[in-house]
Amino acid sequence: MSRIAMVTGAGSGIGRASALALLADGWSVVLAGRRGEPLAETASLSGAAERTLCMPTDVTKPAEVEALFDAVKARFGRLDLLFNNAGGNVPAANFGDVTYEQWSHVVSVNLNGCFLVAHAAFRLMRDQTPRGGRIINNGSISAHRPRPGAAPYTSTKHGITGLTKTISLDGRKYDIACGQIDIGNAATPLTKRMTTGVIQPDGTMRVEPTMDVNDVGRTIAFMASLPPEANVQSIMITAAKMPFMGRG
């Protein structure tokens, strides 16, 4: 039977690399993201556009998430894997200078959006026949060690860890597995600043090594390939020489 996956934030970076890895592994993939053109580009790059469904979606809007899953049910009838990847951030700022609008924006995308998509996926996986599936939430190494000036982002990523553990526990009776991937310094447009310098805990600026984003895609494909009775509860993949161990 065809395996059906969904990747949010599939128009670029980690989402695109993961969608391409899943398509290369034979999955049919629902590509979700805010803008249609980058999603279509991801589908084209795969060489398997016939196994994709591009769905422009703002994950912070419940009605759009509902429409996304209605489309999945209409096209495929089920969902076997969700990579809950969509996220965002605001410029680094000392905690005393963070505005409520900045805080709310990051929480809306990283935590509320993650909840909305995971909740809809959980319900579909619970009710489909045969039931079950796998949810992979994109955390961050910020779920373990914060960077300076990153209160909104770090707080949401700690929240993702709690959400992942709860879904994992509540999903057992429905054959739904849930795990989390924590990524550090994958080379994407969002990490270009690493090449010019990133503020360190001691206040200095330092260029940080990055890793190929396709290594993240391969990790997602590995997690997705496991049989239903096995789960990667938590995995961390980082650039080998980035300043993480001993950070702070």
Image (tube, rainbow, N blue to C red):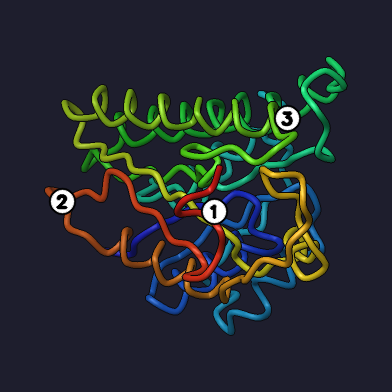
Q: Nearer the viewer, residue 39 or 18?
A: 18
Q: Is disc 1 in contact with disc 2, using a CB cutoff of under 8 Å? A: no
Q: Nearer the viewer, residue 85 or 59?
A: 85
Q: Is residue 7 above or below residue 188?
A: above
Q: Name the residue carrying label 1.
A: 7
User: Which residue is at a point 72% across and 41% down the rendered structure image?
Assistant: 88
Q: Amino acid at mark 1?
A: Val
Q: Name the residue carrying label 3.
A: 106
User: Which residue is at a point 70% across and 25% down the rendered structure image?
Assistant: 108
Image position, residue 224 (x, y; %): 32, 59
C-alpha separation, residue under disc 3 versus residue under disc 2: 32 Å
Nearest to N terminus: mark 3 or mark 1: 1
Image position, residue 131 (x, y; %): 23, 38
Q: Nearer the viewer, residue 88 or 185?
A: 185
Numbered disc in front, either 3 or 1? 3
C-alpha separation, residue under disc 1 versus residue under disc 2: 21 Å
Rendered image quadrant of residue 27: bottom left
Image position, residue 106 (x, y; %): 73, 30
Mark 2, residues whose alpha carbon is within 10 Å: few (<14), some, or many (≥20)? few
Numbered disc in front, either 1 or 2? 2
Q: Name the residue carrying label 2.
A: 230
On screen, residue 156 versus residue 98, left or right, reads: left
Q: Amino acid at mark 3?
A: Val
Q: Secondary structure at mark 2?
A: loop
